Image (cartoon, rainbow, N blue to C red):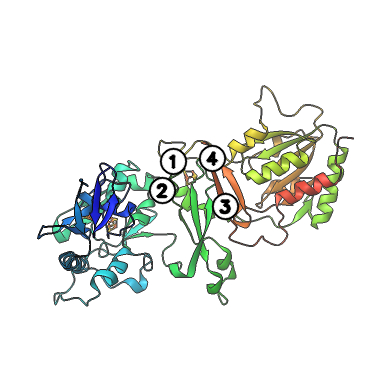
Amino acid sequence: MPEIFINGHSVQAADNQSVLEAARAGGHFIPYFCWHPKLSVAGNCRICVVQVEGRSWVEIACNMPVSEGLRVFTDSDLVKAHRKAVMQFLTLNHPVDCGICDKAGECSLQDYHYAYNGSPSVSREPKVRSTKFHDLSERILLDNERCILCSRCVRFTHEISKSSALGIKHRGDESLVRASEDGALDRDPYSDNVIDICPVGALLSRPFLYKARVWYLTSTPSVCPGCARGCTVKIWHRKPAWHLKALDPGQNASIARVTPLENPAVNGPWICNKGRDLAKILERPRAEEAMLKGTPVALPAAIDAARRLLGAAKRPVALVSSWGSNEELAAFKSALGGRLTAFVKEDCVPEPGERLEDDLLIRADKNPNTTTARALFAPLPGPAEPAFDGETDLVLVWGEGFAFTRLPPKAKIIFLNAYLQPENGHADVFFPVSVQTERHGHYTNFQGAVSAFEPCFARKPGVVDAVTVFAALAAGKAERP
Ligand code: SF4
Ligand code: SF4
Ligand code: FES
């Protein structure tokens, strides 16, 4: 545990730390572009320079090992002069694009310019032009004029996602980040992490391009339900103060983008592209009306009908959702667990072409809460040991993923689902239920880590929380006759 001194303040460093890492851990800020805590050290941007006591030159802190008694200065006149020179160099050919750049508001180059340079350009030469809006992949655009060649994106694909999809070709001011021509970036399910780690606005998300200035948005902590990893995410949506009045008001209650919510216990700083595309899952057309055999009814009428069916049933079975939250699953158990024989079903299975599993994040189970569901209820038996017998006269189906053709033909059906699907109209009683962006809850991932999600949008009119339905059915004294 070497003790080092940063600007005269004692910092207890860990063995093998760099000065940059020890400084960060000790609460001292040293700027960086190319360094990233999860990537190898490249040492190419030079913004992290510090001065060791007694030396008349500067050195980069990201590649300087700590040693007992080392004394460094992060704010000497020499350091300030070098940082300013580095910023002038990095912005020499950088376009003044901030007004139209999606990274504006989250850009280290912009922030460091004001912190460490702040002066107008001293160059009288025209800027070197480069490729704008280069198609790096189906999901990512690259603006080479904005790229500062930090190589973070390249290292990510070599060291983290292991697709080796990116490289830098040519030399000097001809250098260009480019994707390998075999389409590896398109096949990399983690590709969009390079957009987050690009310190400037060079890598652009095609779905998010020009969708919103980031200062119009706020984020809500959530959990990706795309697989049993349960990565923690930030769901970005418009701040109430910036709600649109003139344009489509649906934009005020829609997901603008999804980014990782760093979580060392679950996903570190990464998520996969399926997590970025949560809007495709959670913003499918919604069911908003309760129904009896396809005929819309008010919610109390649906509850009455479901109570009657449940009260009359002799051998009711429930297929419980592996997308239910811990709270919903516990509510089902306490309200109806004694009345129905419950089995856990898989709501989602892998889509064709979807990566099944890997050793980074992605899990084969494409449901977020199988762990809690199976802790409370038995798994759905296979064909050899069916969940239904000739006596099953009612099935409560909660969530997606179970074809009604597999249900006993004469059984009554109570169905809880969030999305518009043909099965909704075939159920004897249908309840349109809320999705996770409309309520609080927790999921437990395959390793037992519990993560919380918060609501970001109001429940749609006509939509009800599943726990309300469970409590209402239980309150109907729907006990076994
Ligand atoms: S595109 Fe971004 S992450 Fe990649 S080298 Fe350029 S600045 Fe760095
Ligand atoms: S690894 Fe699984 S939980 Fe994480 S973002 Fe991807 S689909 Fe979602
Ligand atoms: S952060 Fe140290 S050289 Fe880039």
Q: Residues within 10 Å of mark 4 (few under 14, many from 20)?
A: many
341 lies left or right of 142: right
The answer to whether mark 4 is within 8 Å of ligand 2 is yes
**Kind of element beneath mark 1:** loop
Q: Quadrant of residue 285?
A: bottom right
**Residue 270: assigned label:** 2
The residue at the point 49 percent across, 56 percent down is 234
Q: Amino acid at mark 1?
A: Leu
Of residue 397 and residue 329, the one placed in the foreground of this image is 329
Q: Are marks 1 and 3 in contact (CB under 8 Å)?
A: no
Residues at badges 3 and 4 in contact (C-beta under 8 Å)?
no
| Residue 303 spot, x, y in % from top left | 82, 50
Task: Name the front one of labels 2 and 3.
Answer: 3
- Report how far apart the C-alphas of labels 4 and 2 lie in the structure: 16 Å
Name the residue at 74% across, 29% down: 388
Q: Is residue 329 above or below residue 391?
A: below
The quadrant in which the C terminus is found is top right
Label 3 packing within 10 angstroms: few (<14), some (14-19), many (20+): many
Asked if labels 1 and 2 touch by Cβ distance under 8 angstroms, the answer is yes
Residue 297 shows up from this direction? no
Where is mark 1, residue-wise?
361
Indicate the position of residue 43 as horizontal and vertical percent values. 20, 52
- CB at mark 3 closer than 8 A to ligand 2? no
Q: Is residue 95 above or below residue 281?
A: below
Mark drawn on residue 453:
3
Marks 4 and 1 sit apart, C-alpha to C-alpha, by 12 Å
